[in-house]
Structure formats: C-alpha cells, structure tokens
Image (cartoon, helix red, strand yellow):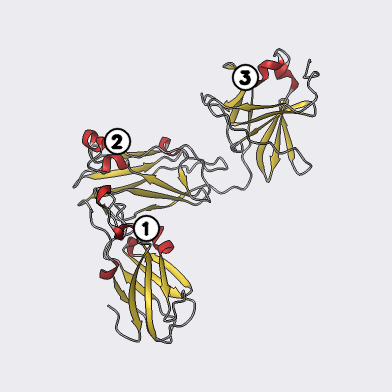
Amino acid sequence: MRLLSDINYITSVRLSAALSLIFFVAVLNGSCNRTTTEGIELLYTDNRAGAVLLPDKLFTKLEPEQYGELKLRLAQNSEFLLGDLVWNQGKFIFTPVVPFTPGETYEVVYKEQVLDSFSISLARNVPVPRITAILPDKDTLPENLLKIYLCFSEPMREGQALRHIRLYDEAGDSLPGTFLELQPELWDSTRSVLTLWLDPGRIKRELIPNQKAGNPLKKGRGYTLEISGTWKSAEGLAIGKSVTKQFIVGLRDDETPRPEKWTLSGVAPSTASRLRINFGEPLDHFLVPQTIRILDPRGRRVRGKVTVVNHGSGAEFLPEERWEPGNYILRTATHLEDLAGNNLVRKFDRDLQKDSAETYKQFVDRGFTVGAKLQ
C-alpha cells in the first residue's frame, strides 16, 4: 500500500459535516486496551471505546488528498461522527468527540460508499436502566406546565430523547411539537436526569407559536406521557418496557410563589427536629434544595439537608445540630420556580418591558423564631 511517505509529520484531518473546530487527539499510551475486529482495532480507555485504528486496506485506492473525505457514522445513519483522524506511526487513528457507544455498529464511509464496519461490544455485568421518577409526579398539572424531569437509574444515551418520548391525548393521538427539541439535551452531570421543556413559544401567549398552535396542554383534558422501552443506557442496554404517566390538566398558573404565605412548623429549641415548610403549591423538585437556606441568629448558615416532600408542595430541613433559641431567617433564592416557571419575583409569561427593581432581587428572606410558635 502507498501510505503518506511524502509526509514526515502527523497529519490531522477534521471529520465533520459542518464544524471546523479542531479537537486535539490524545497520543496512544500503554494504558489503552485493544480489541481487534476484522482488521479494525478498537482502543479502550477506562473501559470505554475511545478510539479506533483503521486498517491499511481502507486507503489503498485513495489519494492522500482524499483522506479527508473518509468519515464514520452509526450504521444506517446519515449523520457523521465528530472527531479527529490522525496519521500516527504508520496508522490512521480516529478519535470521536464522544466515545463510541456499546451495542452499536459503526460504518467507515467514503463518499457514501461503506468501506468497512465494526461493532462495540456490550460491557459485562452492567445493570439494566430503569426510570426511577417522572416529575412532577402529581396527577393534575397546570395548563402552562413548563418542564418535566425524567430520572433514570443509569447514565443514558444523549441526543435521542425525542425519539423515545411521546405524548398522547385522550383519543390516543400522538401530539408532535409539544416538547422543545434541544441539542445538546439538558442532562445533569451524571446523564441520569433529563429536563424536558414543553415548547415555551407555545406557552407565552403573546408569541407567534402560541397564536398559531395554541398552548401545548388544554385545561380539563387528559394526557399520557410514554417513555419507550427501547431507550438505551450509555452502556447500550434498553429499559425493556415502556413506562407511562397519565395526568389531567388543571387551571393555568400565572402567580408567583409567595414565601410570606408559606407555613412553617416542627421546630423545637434544643432539639434537632425538622423544620417543615408548606409551600401551598408544588414547586420545582430540583430547585427547592438548591435555593433554600437557613441562617442562625448570628447570620451564619445552618448546616443541614433540604428534602422535598408532598409531591413538591413542601420541604423539610433537617439540621446537623440542635436548634438554639433565637431569631432565624429562611432565605430563598429568587430563581426558585413553580411548575409553570414563575419564580419568586417574576412570572414566566410576562411583559419584559414592565420588569421592576424587584425582578432583580437575589433572595427573599423570611424570619422565624425558635422558641416561639411558628406560622
């Protein structure tokens, strides 16, 4: 085979349909494990297939200036992988931006001609993923519901969410266009919690999408959210059985949460009893622990844990130490939201030109006394 004998340095070719950013490729080292399949050699790092060595036979009929047109993709998929093709020590090495996915088959393509293919084996003793929660978990949700959280037991594959999610009306008809298609998707750092947005353009009443298509959900109607059992984890195992959540749509919520109306109870001096907070309405499940703090009589943060209870309509704060008698502050960050996206200082569906100084407050404080009856 005629290789790049006229090139005495490493040649890096960007494989991308649209992007031109260059990602540097890590040089192979002794920590990588190798698996060979039909002449294609997979390089594993931390038990993940992070690169592939392409055999010489793929380049025998290509001119050096044609190497940049060699691309990789998922089998039967028209989108090419982002990554780097590097000529190093007599071989071509392709390193994808995102590691190869277990259980998938990939193709090496030149001008739509498949030159070769390879598969990534499933890891052994990997747990089957399952859905642990769909939030909010109430049976009745506001007409202007903004977000749904899908919680999984294992890290999941990214970029495939809307292929596996369907919303059906009472007649069993699918409702396309309900959810906002985002790339990248809104996963947490563990890739086990997905934030799914209903289309905000259809929720805000002054916007064209709302005027053309209406609100995604209709008051008084029932819906079924279905999560496909074919959705696979990052390790390539499918959920196995579809999961559904049924709910009814109630009134529209256009009011901001009001901390001054929350009821507090449960605290007794010289004990480590729980402070119970009743919001009077369900709030965002993941924002509640992030936004609520307790300050002691000296203005110091009280260490403890905030837990969401009662389907998001309340929270409990368990201190690490006993309560001292005195005046405390319940401090809440203003970006805490209800299910419709209204936070403590502004409504989600609002006129931006009418925002006031209150809109830009960072915290809302509410005092309470340990040793006195809470309200």
Q: Nearer the viewer, mark 3 or mark 1?
A: 1
Quadrant placement of the N terminus = top right
Q: Is mark 1 on a helix, strand or loop?
A: loop
In the displayed structure image, the side of residue 337 where residue 39 appears, left or right:
right
Q: Position of residue 25 (x, y in %)?
A: 69, 36
Is 76 in front, or is 343?
343
| Residue bearing the label numbered 1 | 335
| Residue bearing the label numbered 3 | 69
Tell me the crowding category of disc 3: few under 14, some 14 to 19, or many 20 or more residues within 10 angstroms, Cα based.
some
| Residue bearing the label numbered 2 | 175
Q: Marks 3 and 1, Cα distance to the nearest angstrom?
A: 48 Å
Asked if residue 144 shows in the view, the reply is no
The residue positioned 64% from the left and 45% from the top of the image is 124
In the displayed structure image, the side of residue 348 where residue 90 appears, left or right:
right
- The residue type indicated by label 2 comes to Leu
- The residue type indicated by label 3 comes to Glu
Q: What element carries label 2?
A: loop
In the displayed structure image, the side of residue 134 where residue 2 appears, left or right:
right
Q: Nearer the viewer, mark 1 or mark 2?
A: 1
The residue positioned 63% from the left and 43% from the top of the image is 123
The residue positioned 21% from the left and 45% from the top of the image is 221
Q: Earlier in the sequence, mark 3 or mark 1?
A: 3
Asked if residue 33 shows in the view, the reply is yes
- Residue 274: image quadrant is bottom left
- Residue 87: image quadrant is top right
- Residue 71: image quadrant is top right
Q: Position of residue 237 (x, y in %)?
A: 54, 41
Is 32 in front, or is 342?
342
